Amino acid sequence: MLDVGFSELLVFGIIALLVLGPDKLPEAARFAAKWYSKFKRAISSVQNDIDRELRLSEFREQMQQEMQKIQELEQKMQAQMQELQQQKIAVEQESHLAITDNKKIHTTYHKLDITVPAIYMSKTWLDKQNCTVTRPQIVLVKEVPQLKVAV
């Protein structure tokens, strides 16, 4: 701003002492300091307002960009939902055609003859198995093998 050194301030103080006198000089210095602080606060306030407005405008731009991204994602999701609905309708139509053509869909289940350790079977499952098929062979295992996980 102003390049004022100590010698210039000394000259200014001597002139002020001669013009105002020793009685009014302290009062004039307080008055000048008060106005200087008010001026400095006003400048600082203006700078803070400008900084705040700049940050606010940047924040608004970021929000608009994020809103655009969200809208794009929403459009993609809607397109995928429509695709899935169309696939569902196509599958329903195919299954309806299969039923109307008197085509029977058979699902075959194969009984597995395996030995399952009793610790892996619940009592409810064993009871249900007892009703429909012969009871599976139960092998009592004294030690349960530990599972190892590779990382």
Image: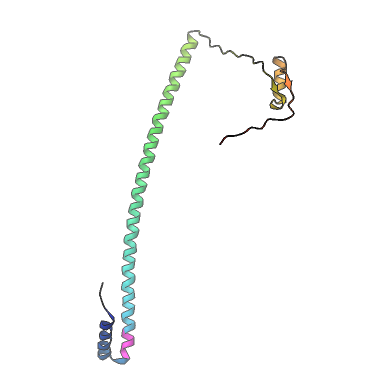
- Residue 84 versus residue 13 in the image, above or below: above
Colour option used: rainbow
Please state which of residues 127 and 32 is positioned toward the viewer in this rendering.
127
Which quarter shows the N terminus?
Answer: bottom left
Residue 86: x and y, percent?
41, 23
Give left or right: position of 81 versus 102.
Answer: left
Q: Quadrant of residue 109?
A: top right
Residue 6: x and y, percent?
29, 81
Q: Quadrant of residue 108?
A: top right
Please state which of residues 143 and 21 is positioned toward the viewer in this rendering.
143
Which quarter shows the C terminus?
Answer: top right
Residue 14: x and y, percent?
27, 88
Tell me what residue is drawn at x 73 percent, y 26 percent.
Answer: 141
Residue 123: x and y, percent?
72, 25
Tell me what residue is drawn at x 40 percent, y 27 percent.
Answer: 82
**Magenta residue check for 24:** yes
For the record, the magenta segment spans 23-28
Q: How many marks?
A: 0
**Magenta residue check for 85:** no
- Residue 57 versus residue 35 in the image, above or below: above
Tell me what residue is drawn at x 41 percent, y 33 percent.
Answer: 77
- Residue 84 versus residue 26 in the image, above or below: above
